[in-house]
Amino acid sequence: MAAPHPQTWLMPRPEGLWCEPGGFFIDPARPVDRAVVTHGHGDHARPGNRAVLATPGTVAIMRARFGAAAGESLQALDYGQALRIGAVDVTLLPAGHVLGSAQVRLACQGSTVVVSGDYKRRPDPTCAPFEPAACDVFVTEATFGLPVFRHPDDRGEIARLLHSLAVFPERSHVVGVYALGKCQRIIALLRGAGYDRPIYLHGALQELCDLYRRLGVDLGALLPATASERGALMGQIVLAPPAAIADRWARRLSDPVVALASGWMRVRQRAKQRGVELPLVISDHADWDELTRTLAEVDAPEVWVTHGREEALMRAATLQGRRARALALVGFEEEGQ
Amino acid sequence: MKDFARLLDALVFTPQRNAKLRLIEDYVRHTPDPDRGHAVAALTGDLSFARAKPALVRALVEARVDAELFRWSYDYVGDLAETAALIWPDPAGAAGPPPALSAVVARLHAAGRTEIPGLLAQWLDGLDATGRWALLKLITGGLRVGVSAGLVRAALARLGGVEPAAIEEVWHGLQPPYRALFQWLEGRAPAPLPARGASFRPMMLAHALDEAELAAMDPAEFRAEWKWDGARVQLAAAGGTIRLYSRTGDEIGAAFPDLVDALAASGPLDATLDGELLVARPGAGDLAPAPFAELQQRLNRKAVGAKMMRDRPAFLRAYDLLFEAGEDLRSFAFDVRRTRLEAWHLRERPPRVDLSPLVAFGDWDELKALRARARADGIEGLMLKRGDSAYVAGRPKGPWFKWKRGPLTVDTVLMYAQRGHGKRSSFYSDYTFGCWRPSASGEGRELVPVGKAYFGFTDAELAELDRWVRAHTTNRFGPVREVEPALVLEIACDSVQRSTRHKSGIAMRFPRVSRIRWDKPAGEADEVATLERALES
């Protein structure tokens, strides 16, 4: 007897992606009884679920972010360890997105589905690299699902930041970064490029940097960007959440060069709209080439697209000879918006 | 090409003038000849190719990328050069090395139309995304990186540690890639001064007069002229050539053949004149200037039709003589040049050239009264020039002043605010304001936007305005906020003109915020009809 099609046991529901034989949702958008969480970003990990399963890194991040609201019971599952939940074998595999990020492999009734969450394929010193896994259905994001999104080498982008610092040594360089992942990756990339001066942090970034350090990621000297006198952060690199870089908070800085690290910075008009002077194309999401290469590598005959620019990625999947379907899950945000 | 691309990319995102200067200076300092010269020419608009058409770019891309994917991408990005640059796939085999800018320039100039697609594809293969974008911008024309030719020359002045005026003096005799210029700026050769002839000489500019300064100025030392509301130009004639230059040294003679041809037909001329380009009211006998809006119809045109020349004939109102028969008069005093100008004009009687008369006055009060009455067409105010002033390039402080007539002011209501750039990027500093008019439905009144202003206030006032905008926002559109119609801004402007481009049907010249009327209820702001009464006929 042929295995039943995975769409009979894994399906979108208003709360999120529902795995019926396991009785859990993956990255639910509203509180549920049992949730498997791929990673700690706010649009995937939300407070208020009763039981949560995630990697040890993601569990730690959720505890730091939500405290007691992270869930009544938080169960950590290491990468590669299989766990039987109901009629489903669940395994978490590294997704390379941020620390603790995971793909969820579900094996049930003779077929395998991989829900990849958010992922990227290029090396990131702050998290484990994406592990491609063969499957019957590959569930993918498509945040950068247009062939114009091809992220350059992140070391080159960091070199542009350092070049700007050399040309404008009297100006602060304020870089907009997400608190989880992007912030620590930028710091690690700067350290990798030989930048060993202290890096200044907006208050909202401190806690997760501390957590990354406790989890063994070396970030070098970090100082709070609380200088009150003007000009104190002259010629320094200051990291802040994207919402703060061109707003009132940044006025304390010395004639700042406003930079933003995001895959969207690839499109000039988009960067200009944000008032960004130094766009850094550094993303924690797969770019177009990584998305299409991943489809080919995991070689699933069927691809489901969760969120982003579905139509172009579905077209690419079709051109590769795969069946493609949009799940149209709601609640996921564009990076860096 | 890589460094040039990096420069363009940085310039696009850099709002501050000073930072742009530094970027350009840094580039020319570290880039060898002839690349840097071609880059300068590209930035100043002095480089042009038989242009690659957008259709060619599209065809090249569609030969490599699925057309459907390209269409979605173009929809998203909105700019063809950028879409093509980003979507261009890595070449299948090993690509050649990225081309040098000078190689691109040389080969494009030499290539036939059929060779261009192949060349382009080969270069696109060798470049990264930013390089491809810069290449496509370069060859499809129009860099649009927010850099003027004057800014580039100012950066060159910084490279050589010379005055910008010194660059201006040599600039107009030079050709890309400007090797002689760089040799001079790097101290390896003397300045490449232009040969005598109909070349452009940098202009002398005036400071705006602060009336408080008048008390310390001796009226006997100054001469007054009307300030004409036209376009400042330089007319250079020598050796049978007549050229008309804009204030930035661009040749604009082709758009004014009625003036240039009339002069050429009248006999040999050898002089360089500084003056105001105006258009006359047709059939007015003497040359009577029409409003600026009439002249504007003729500016920014490459060619001009017979009807346009008949309805809006161009003429020159001269006020200075820089060269006469090869003699450089610029170091002489204004009074001497004026005498020479009048004598020259009387002798040559050139058609379509008249003189801007000196305005006689005894003391500043008398002149003030004259200025206050001067609302005639074509007069913007007064110019004050020291009788002993030499003609020097640039804007020296002291010898020349412009004293514009009092501005019109109108009370408007703030409607939208937009974030500024650079230092002001955290402030809502660009304001769209409106006036009242009877609403389309016939009931009550509605606000209609009449203009946009982003200066005229102090930093402290900006901080207050910013706070007000944030507290009264009713709607957001990206960087723009719509605000409650509750704050009155008094706007000053030089004049009001009819416009088909604006919903209100009028456009203001040089609008700026003159006062913030925290006290005034929005309902008491002016009506559009008030502005219409100020329209120049």
Image (cartoon, coloured by chain):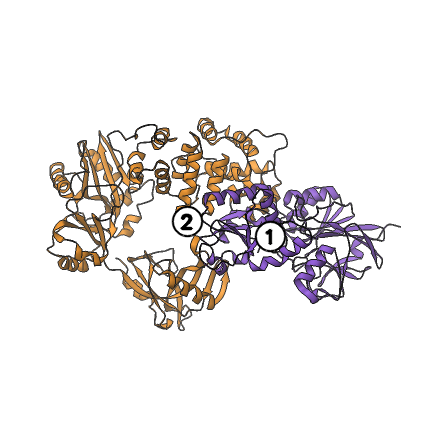
The crowd level at tag 2 (other Cα within 10 Å; few <14, some 14-19, many 20+) is: few
The residues bearing labels 1 and 2 have C-alpha atoms spaced at a distance of: 27 Å
Instruction: Identify the disc placed on residue A183.
Output: 1
- The answer to whether residue B379 is seen in the rendering is no
Left or right of residue B345: residue A263: right
Chain B: give its colour: orange
Q: In which quarter of the image is the C terminus of chain B?
A: bottom left
Instruction: Identify the disc placed on residue B33.
Output: none
Residue receiving disc 2: B16
What x and y, as percent, mark residue A112? 80, 50
Disc number lying in front (1 or 2): 1
Residue A287 figure quarter: top right
Chain A: give its colour: purple
The amino acid type found where label 1 is placed reads: Cys
Disc 1 secondary structure class: helix
Which of these two is toward me, A132 or A19? A132
What x and y, as percent, mark residue B354? 17, 44
The image shows residue A221, relative to residue B151, as above or below, that is below
